Amino acid sequence: MAFKSCTSFSLVFLAMALAITFLATPAASTVDLCADADYKALCKAALRGITNPTAGTQVTIKALISETHRGIMNAKRFPGKDNIAKVCKESYEDALDNLNKSLNNVREQDKGSLNINLSAAYADFVSCDDAYSERGRVSPYARLNRHLERMASNSLAVATVLHW
């Protein structure tokens, strides 16, 4: 009789343990990568349902690289008379370098360097507008830079979810 009770208890315990394990697994896989993002709508549009932190970080960085190429093309197309656009082109190129390093940081699972390189890319976008404001002018790239800054901010937020 005691053996039968012990067996029943063991089976109930096993069933409960399995149920808890299976119920906990989906919750872990549905992490909201945009929870800490300052620009949630932009973040969710970029990720389109991706819940894997590594994949999400890569997607946001690749989208930022694509938009940064647009900045370079604009700076080449509208060089300006006083070479301020050249400063912006160089800033965008520096940002691309930092973003490519960021992708490598993700592959190497180097979160510290990832944060440094994403932050550097963010600063590169700011420096383009600063070049104009130092001369008392409004940057013709201000709208694009604001968008790039928001994307970089979101990339940093998504990267905080990484647990390597």
Image (tube, rainbow, N blue to C red):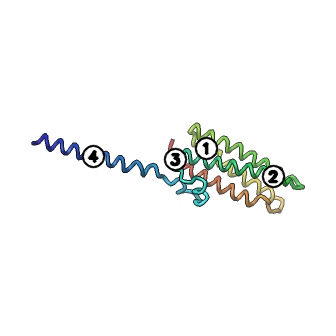
Amino acid residing under circle 2: Ala
Of mark 1 and mark 2, the one earlier in the sequence is 2
Q: Nearer the viewer, residue 37 or 17?
A: 17
Mark 2 lies on a secondary structure that is: helix
Q: How far across and down, in percent of the image, does residue 112 sit?
A: 58, 43
Mark 4 lies on a secondary structure that is: helix
Residue at 14% over, 44% down: 5
Give the mark toward the camera: 1 or 2. 2
Of mark 3 and mark 1, the one earlier in the sequence is 3
Circle 2 is placed at which residue position? Answer: 75
Of mark 2 and mark 4, the one earlier in the sequence is 4
Label 4: few (<14), some (14–19) or many (≥20) C-alpha neighbours in 10 Å: few
Question: Do the numbered discs 4 and 1 sit on residues whose CB atoms are within 8 Å?
Answer: no
**CA separation, marks 2 and 4?**
63 Å
**CA separation, marks 3 and 1?**
17 Å
**Residue 52: assigned label:** 3
Circle 4 is placed at which residue position? Answer: 15
Amino acid residing under circle 3: Asn
Quadrant occupied by the N terminus: top left
Of mark 4 and mark 3, the one earlier in the sequence is 4
Give the mark toward the camera: 4 or 1. 4
Residue 126 higher or lower than 111, as above or below: below
Question: Do the numbered discs 2 and 4 sit on residues whose CB atoms are within 8 Å?
Answer: no
**CA separation, marks 4 and 1?**
42 Å
**Residue 114: assigned label:** 1
Residue 134 falls left or right of residue 95: right
Of mark 3 and mark 2, the one earlier in the sequence is 3
